[in-house]
Structures are given as C-alpha cells and as structure tokens.
Amino acid sequence: MTVTHILSLLGGLALFLYGMHMMSTGLEETAGDKMKNILEKLTRNRFLGVLVGALITAVIQSSSATTVMVVGFVNSGLMTLRQAIWIIMGANIGTTITGQLVALNISELAPILAIVGVIFVTFIRNKKINNIGTILAGLGILFIGMGMMSDAMYPLRESQSFIQLITTISNPFIAIVVGTAFTALIQSSSASVGILQTLANSGLIPLSSSIYIIFGQNIGTCITSVLASISANRAAKRTTIIHLSFNLIGTVLFMIAIQFIPFVDWMVALTDVPAAQIANTHTIFNIVTTLVLLPFGNQLATLAEKILPVLDEEKEDALSSLPLTFVTSENIGNASIAIASLKKEATFMLELTRKNINDSFDSLLATSPNKNEKILIRENRINLINVQITEYMSKVSMLHMSEQDSNTTSALYKCFSDIERIGDYAVNLVHYGTDNIKNIEVIEKELKELKQYINDMCELLFISDLNQSHFDKLCVMEEKIDQLTSSYRKNQIKRLTEGVVEATECIRYSQIMTDIERIGDHIMNIMKEYYKVQFTIVKKTL
C-alpha cells in the first residue's frame, strides 16, 4: 500500500465514524425525551425491557450510548440493577441493525443522501427537519467513508505480508483479542463491524476468521460503559460488570457450540454476500445469547454483586436516604439523565422540607418539642443538597440540550431555591416555639388551621398527573392563607389591647404569620415553575 492508500483508508475511517456520530446525534435529538421516558416506565418486565433496549439502540444506532445511559440511570437511582439487565440485553440486539444497514450496500445512493441531508440542515429552518437532515447526511457520509476504505484496501489483496497476517488471525483466540482491542480503541462495535464488513467485501478476510473477531467486538464494546462507570457509584459499576459478563458468557457458549455445529456453513448458506454474512452472524450471536441468558438475569445481578459486594455504607445510604441520593456531580451522563435525576432530588428535598414543616408546627404548638433535633438535622441536609445542586447545575448547564430541557432545568433551579427557603421558615417556627409563646386555645386553633392548609398545599406538589384543577385549587389555598394570616394578625392585636397577650408575644405572632404566609408563597412558586414546564399552554396566565 502506498501513502496515498493509507491516507485514503484513514480518511474513509474518519468519514465512517463521523457519519455514525451525525446519525446518532440526529436520532437522539429526535427521540431523546421519549427514549428517557420509555426507559423509566417499561423496564420492570424483562421482555419489555429487552424490547425497549433493542428498539432504542436501533434508533440511536449505538449500544454504547444506550449502556452509558443505563449506567447513568442506575447511578442516579432512577433504575435498579435488575431493571438495567434487560436494557443491556436488548441493546446488544439493537446494535446489530447498523451491520444490517451496511449489508444492504446502498453506497451508490450515499452522495444523494448526503446532499439531501445537507440541504435539510443548511437551508430549512425547522428543528425536526434539521434533525432528519443530520440523520440522512450522517448515513450518506458513513457509506462514502466505507467506499473510500474499500477502495484503499483493494491493493491488500496482492500483499503477501497482509495475507500472512490474516492467516495468523485465523487463530480463534488471537482473533478475539484483535476484535476486542480494536473495538475498545474506537469505542463502537457498530463501527468495528462495519470495518470488518469492508474487509470481507474486499475479499481480504473469510467468515471463518471473521466470526471470532465478531465475538471480540462484542466484548470490546463494553469499554464505553466501563469508562462511564469509573466515577459512578458501585451500583453503576455492577451494571458494567453485567454488560461484560453477558458478552463473555455469549462468547464462551458460541466457542463451544461451533465445535459441534457447522455454524459458519449455515451463515454462508443464508447469503453469498460477505457483508451480510457478518451482519447475520453478529445479529444471531446477540439474539441467541439474550435468549439463553434471559431466564438468568437475576443470577447475573447476583454475580455482579459477588464480584463487587454491597458495602454496609450502601445499605445505610439506602435506608437513611442521605442527601444527593439521585445525582452525582462527577458523572452527569446526558441532559435527559441529568434532568430526571434533578427531579428525583427535588422531590426528595421537598419531602424533607414537608416533614420539617409538620414537625415545626408541632414544636410551635408544644405538642412534640423532642422533634427539634431531627428538624435541625434535616435542615442541614437540605442546605447541603442546595449547595451541591448548585455545583451540579453549573455542570448540567454545559450539556447540549433542547429548548424544553433548558427551560425545565431553569425551572428546577428556581424550585430548589424555593424549597431551601421553605426549610428556613420551618426552622424559624421552631425557634418561635422555643421562645415559649403563650399558646392560648384560640391561637392553637388558628395555627392548626394554617398547618392544615400548608399540608394540603404540599400534598398537591406530590401529585404526578397535575392538571388545571389542581393548579386552581392551590391558588385558592394560597389566597386563603394570605387572608387568614392577615386576619390572625388583627386578632392578636385585638388580644393585645384586651390585655390577653403581651407586646412581645404580639410581635412574635406577627412574625409567625409572616413566615407561614411566605411558606405558602414559595409552595405557589414551585407549583408555577413545575406547571410552566409541564403545561406550557398556561404560561401566559402565570
């Protein structure tokens, strides 16, 4: 091979990889939010989980992207280890679609696809059309790159040194190592399979050698999830162990099976097109391995837990729900994972705050003064979450995200601030209670009524399917709290003039009413932000 051929080969590889990246980006932009929602909702059933993993990976054209996403979900607590198993199995099936597309050999249409895609991206101002253009341009560039690689490798047919190297690769174990190493290097089994198909189409490598390289490629693709889990928690690392175990077990099973069955002959009998033979081998390997291991998913999880045992600290964390249970600053993932994690963390923080409100009212009413220590511990957690969330948000803001994701992130940031302020007002109530307010019967009645309204408002924030009626109901409650706190201030002033309470108690009671009123205001702020991103139709009325 000349320098020109080598440069052409590298250029073709660059175009192939860039085309895959463009196609993946366009598809993920088109289906990102739906993909995240599907992953969250349909992974409890193993068969649905496998199907979802396969479909999503087929859509985004990358098992690496899917497994990294799953690692992120497990790391953020949005998915259990046993739910992740089925997605990983499905991802291994879905990734084979790229090889099947390459086997179709639509290289003659590649320039047309690239031109149409560029026109869609450059001359049409519509986000959906732009995404479709990115997909088409990526597909076209991918095939142009494959064509360049194929042309560049043509002289290798006559190279004795290359022929000797290919003969060496016929050793199964060396072939597996080559497939693993190359796929780990470029971090894409789809890309390495595509390159292998190019070699096969050029007549440079027979299927009898390719089959072992394919086994190695399935192992090598795990490197991406390994890298993603380096800074993740131990649960996410176990997800990576499962991914690696799946492909290692599949390789061992096929290595044993092909000693007894004419597997290569079967693949050749299906089609005489080398690229299609490799694509079919890749697909069948992953489908058969999934079918064999599907009943043993829980055992794979147990194996991962034995390799990386569950620490006592993890058990304690799970029981005590320590701050930042759902987000990890070192491993954000993508915008969808980050936003889902932030929603979970906001819900957890809000639950801590709600408990403090209840306990603070009880302390104020002198019904449970022994709760003060727990209130202060929760307040410290709330403050810690708020500080760490601010740091996390600064990293999330640098992620590529859609306008809707950007709006949601901004709304969540405001919600965290409002929740933290509610926590401060709840602690204020504790201090008022500690100062021994004279709780005459009528004041207790007023405070209990306000406590009930605040509780009812908090309950509405935890409803998953908010609608206009819930929003209207909260507005009415917030207005009622404003009216009651104003009325109760006047009542206390009247009690002062009647000599029932002292001036200091009157001032303190007015401060209590102010804090309760502000708690209601901040709950309303949270509802408004949540409602804006969930129901944009009412933005103008807020």
Image (tube, helix red, strand yellow):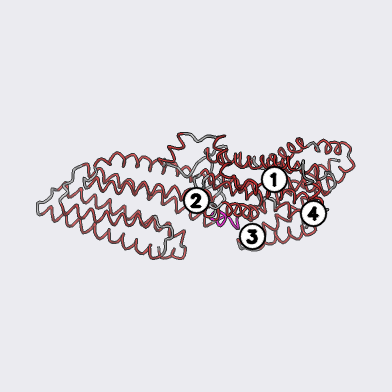
The residue to which callout 4 is attached is 270
Residue 532 falls within the magenta-colored stretch: no
The residue to which callout 2 is attached is 340
User: Mark 1 or 4 closer to N-term?
Assistant: 1
Magenta stretch, main secondary structure class: helix
> Which callout, 4 or 3, points to the residue nearer the camera?
4
User: Mark 1 or 3 closer to N-term?
Assistant: 3
- Check if mark 1's residue and mark 3's residue have beta carbons within 8 Å: no
- Which amino acid, by three-letter code, is at mark 2? Ala
Q: In the figure, residue 370 lies in which quadrant?
A: top left
Nearer to us in this view, 382 or 289: 289
Residue located at (38% from left, 41% from top): 381
Residue located at (11% from left, 54% from top): 497
In the image, residue 496 lies at what x, y percent? 13, 52
262 left or right of 233? right
Q: Secondary structure at mark 1?
A: helix
User: Mark 4 or 3 closer to N-term?
Assistant: 3
> Which callout, 1 or 4, points to the residue nearer the camera?
4
Measure the C-alpha gap from mark 4 to mark 3.
Answer: 38 Å
- Which amino acid, by three-letter code, is at mark 1? Ser
User: Mark 2 or 3 closer to N-term?
Assistant: 3
Name the residue at the front extreme.
260
Give the magenta part as a residue range. Answer: 29-37
Q: In the figure, residue 211 lies in which quadrant?
A: top right
Please tell me the numbered disc located at residue 130: 3
